[in-house]
Image (cartoon, grey):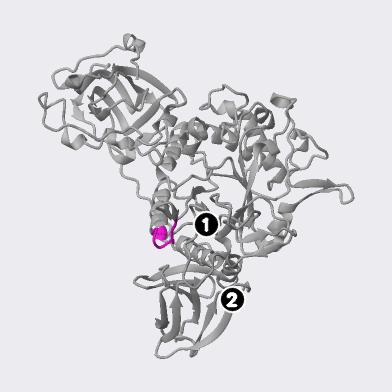
Amino acid sequence: MHSYLLTILSLITVCCSCGGKWQDRTGSLSGQIQKIPVGRDQVFDLSGYADEGGGNPYNLFDENAYVDPRNKPAGEPYIPSTNCQPTQHPEIYFASGKGSRIVVDLLVPYALKEIYLFDRSAVNDSVWIYTGSLKQWKPVAALETVSDAGARGWRKLAVDERSRFVMIRFSSYETGITEMVLYGTPLESQPPVKQITSAGSFTRKPLNRFLGVNYIMEDEPKWLKPFHYSRLYNFALDFDNDTKHQGEEVQFNMLHYGYYRTDLKKYVFDLDTLKSINRGNIWYSIRGVSKWMNDLGYTDKDRPLNRPGMNTEDPAAYSRHAEMMWHLAAFFGNTKVDTNLLSLSHEPRASGRGSMSLFENGNEEDAWWVGNKYCSPVEYYAQSVADLDGDEGKQGKRRGILHADPHSRLMMSGLAGLDTNRVKVYKFLSENLRKDGRFVWQGGIQYHYYCHANGKGVSPEADSLRLKLMRVRDCSRRMAPEVECFLGENGYDKSQASSQATPILPGYSVSESQGIMLLRSINAAFFSGFDAYILYWLKDGNPENDPRVYTTSGILRLMPDGKTMAYPGWYYISSLVNRLGNYLPDSVILEKGNVWIYRYRHQQFRDSVAYFVYAPTNNGTKIARYRLWVGNTAGNTVGKIEFSDDSDRGEARLLPVKQGFVSIPVDEKPRLVFSKEFLPSSH
């Protein structure tokens, strides 16, 4: 990496410390200079590499406890070694030309006096230090790293700044700064630690409001009966297809999946029919750019700017996209707006259909595999505040979903993994860039996750899915207690040539094995504390042996004759919802050995419980007679449900209870046991 001439250095005035004490600019003595503590939760990676990029921004401060370069003699024995830079596909995090930026929040303003950096670089490069705020940064110091191994060590920067925030910017991932130590004096007392009250271990939604599915559009509503949520894939060019006009003259098209019936004098949309099936919640996952930008060669992974070349971190650059989102909320939302405000390419104008209240403005914006099209957290934040409310009204009243329908909510674009670090940055940006400080994505924090290891799909138990989701839920709740957590994609391919192929269970077909893995995954998510599970995918349209990943994940298949065939997975999930739809997660009874047991409880009739029982293996485990404890029951029998390949309610039979136990067979396919607890009458 070539060296940069730091012209910024000539613009910066630095001051020396004064014998261990300092005076502020008003001349008052303010205290002893001290090493400023920096915790993990105070460090924010604005480039977003902390998960998929393999790096850890906190490595810039993680060895502070072992070093004190200001007060110890040069050549102290401890050499900081942990590098904060990304290690996997690192170039994409520097593609914007802005470099990689790490911000530390000191929690209160400090009088900063000295900054020490441990330089272990192998190249000459540039590093800049800023103070101020996320709205306005001020450059205060800079250095050029060394490439001579003999010159490596602590580099001191003297500053005289009052600031709560400090930002360090790297121009290259080859820069090797392995530790940063800040010195100064606090100007305020540290705030008390905020105590986040847990909303409970499990979701308070019953199962019939927990499940959803991803698809394009379904013309047979009956297949959506098990699913409360519908996440529909869409592209911005379907709604912003005007290639003639710019600015306020752009005309939007809301007729994707719909049309106007002159005989009925109303618009007809398939999504309204689908929503009526289970009073569900439908939303569009809208990705990509407008039609006119698409015609210029831009793709669904490019930023949806007003025009190419604009600043991707400026909300104003997304005002056209925000206007499209306003029209979507005005047309499909729950609030009637003045139709004279609508700019549509079709007549008549209409608003407030009541079709949807959730809107998702992208999909997997953190995708690392798109190279230099990767979207940083700051870029996605800028787009999202425009899409939410026109950057708090700065862009006018016809921008953002809230200005069309105050009841609408923005769903976070699904993350390509369980990346809580990125959510942490989103929360930080929301708190410090918005006047209201409110988390932008009130519609939900959405993660995508597939159980996968060593190049193939694995069972949810082998992947510890429930425990992983539980940790992610707890972390998300600490950051945004009021916002629900969605598992927006999860599933298995039937094709054994896919890298996400379902494990095949002995004695079961591929499609049966897929359905069993889905049952076990849904149960794991339900007992993790997540608030929704959105299955990937509804219907396949290609051969069952298609080797491409995620192309055989459906629980339905469109046959060559145009008819739809249901796989066992559809029947299993339908039976689960038909039998347990009004039940909540109650407790994890047993999660070790060859039998795992979970108890569900009816949300209204609290004496009604159900046990989800199975072997968590995939090696053919069978137990002929397992004694399941159900305790005192109202009556001497319980109901057992076997999941069937061709029934949407399963196969039921009664079993006797003896001394609080019921004997059932257990294998890798779950079974349900329903019991009515005996509640003695009170006097």
Quarter of the N terminus within the rendering? top left
Task: Give the x, y percent position of residue 307.
Answer: 62, 24
- In magenta segment, residue 391: no
Q: Image height check: is 359 above or below 603?
A: above
Name the residue nearer the viewer: 123 or 579: 123
Provide the residue designation for mark 1: 491
What amino acid type should be assigned to the residue bearing mark 1?
Gly
SS class of the residue under badge 2?
loop
Q: How many marks?
A: 2
Horizontally, is 626 left or right of 445 in the view?
left
Q: Residues within 10 Å of mark 1 (few under 14, many from 20)?
A: many
- Distance between mark 2 and mark 1 Cα atoms: 22 Å
Task: Say which of marks 2 and 1 sits in front.
Answer: 1
Q: What's the magenta region?
A: 457-466
Residue tagged 2: 650
**Amino acid type, residue under disc 2 in the picture:** Gly
Q: Earlier in the sequence, mark 2 or mark 1?
A: 1
| Residues marked 2 and 1 touching at CB (< 8 Å) | no
Farthest residue in the right direction?
Answer: 263
Is residue 464 part of the magenta span, yes or no? yes
How busy is the neighbourhood of tag 2: few (under 14 within 10 Å), some, or many (20 plus)?
Answer: many
Q: Is residue 278 visible?
A: no
Query: Can you tell which quarter of the image residue 387 is in?
Result: top right
User: In this rendering, does residue 477 appear at all?
Assistant: yes
Q: Is residue 526 left or right of residue 162?
A: right
